[in-house]
Image (cartoon, helix red, strand yellow):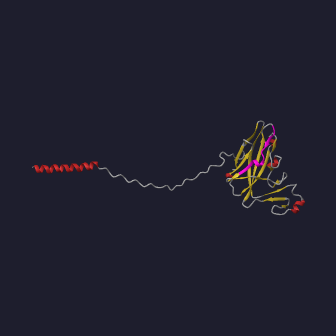
Amino acid sequence: MRWSFGIIAAGILVIALLCAGCANSQPAPAPTPAPTESTATAVPTTAPPFPGALTPGEYVSFGAGDMHGNATVVRYAIRPNYTWTSPSFNSAAEQKSATGPGGVVNGYNTETPKAGDAFLFVYLKLVNTGSKAVYAPSPSQYIVYADGVRYNYTSVHGPDAVVDGVAGGQYDYQIGKGGVGGYIQPGASNAVNGYLIYEVPGSIDPADTYFIADLDSVNRGVWKLS
């Protein structure tokens, strides 16, 4: 009997140890998935060079006190070339002796840009809103900016030059000085309506082209052409 009780006790102990092992066992943790690299690439964003640029027709004030005015870009045009005539240039003798690609044909001279370029006409309007004559900025104070490059204006032949199909005269001759600043008298009837010509790449996008006017020492206007 003692032997039988010993065997039973040993069996109970073994069963108890096995149950304890089952109770304390934990399921194996799930494997951690290997990190995957994203194949998406960040698209770089380019900030506009002149945030808040104006659109044609919006005015910028310049001057101070009783000598002040408003300036704006009215519109623009891109032309592959242009023809012009001038009473003082297109005399009979000059027409007879004219040679080369810029020669005179029937009184008209054809201006042709370098290969791949075009002519950009920017039309300006300046009005004196004060009570005294206001200084008009020199045409050299107006530049075109496109694709990180600045372009200066190119002048027509003279104050009496008329560009075919273009109303009005070049800005610098509109202010009476031909290349330097002049004065604008008060009143809307004395407003300056003129154009400036720039030779630019024919591939420029007007939506990314800016016209910059340093009107005086403190006032600047920047217009996006379209």
Q: Along the horizontal axis of the image, is 91 left or right of 206?
A: right
Which residue is outermost to the front?
217
Q: Residue at x 17, y 51 (%)?
A: 11
Question: Which residue is the extreme one toward the left?
Answer: 1
The answer to whether residue 95 is visible is yes
- Decide: is 98 above or below 49: below
Magenta stretch holds residue 88: no
Question: Toward which corner of the image does residue 107 lie, by quadrant?
Answer: bottom right
Number of residue marks: 0
The spot of residue 9 in percent (x, y) is 16, 49
Q: Residue 112, image x and y in percent? A: 77, 59
Q: Work out which residue is located at the far right of the displayed protein and give it.
A: 93
Location of residue 4 in the rendering, given as x and y in whole percent from the top left corner: 12, 51
Residue at the spot 78% in from the left edge and 50% down from the top edge = 195
Residue at 74 percent of width and 57 percent of height: 118
Q: Is residue 58 visible?
A: no
- Of residues 36 and 85, the one drawn nearer to the viewer in this rendering: 36
Q: Position of residue 176 (x, y in %)?
A: 83, 47
Task: Please check the rendered image and state whether residue 134 is part of the magenta-colored stretch, yes or no.
Answer: yes
Q: Quadrant of residue 116?
A: bottom right
Magenta residues span: 132-144
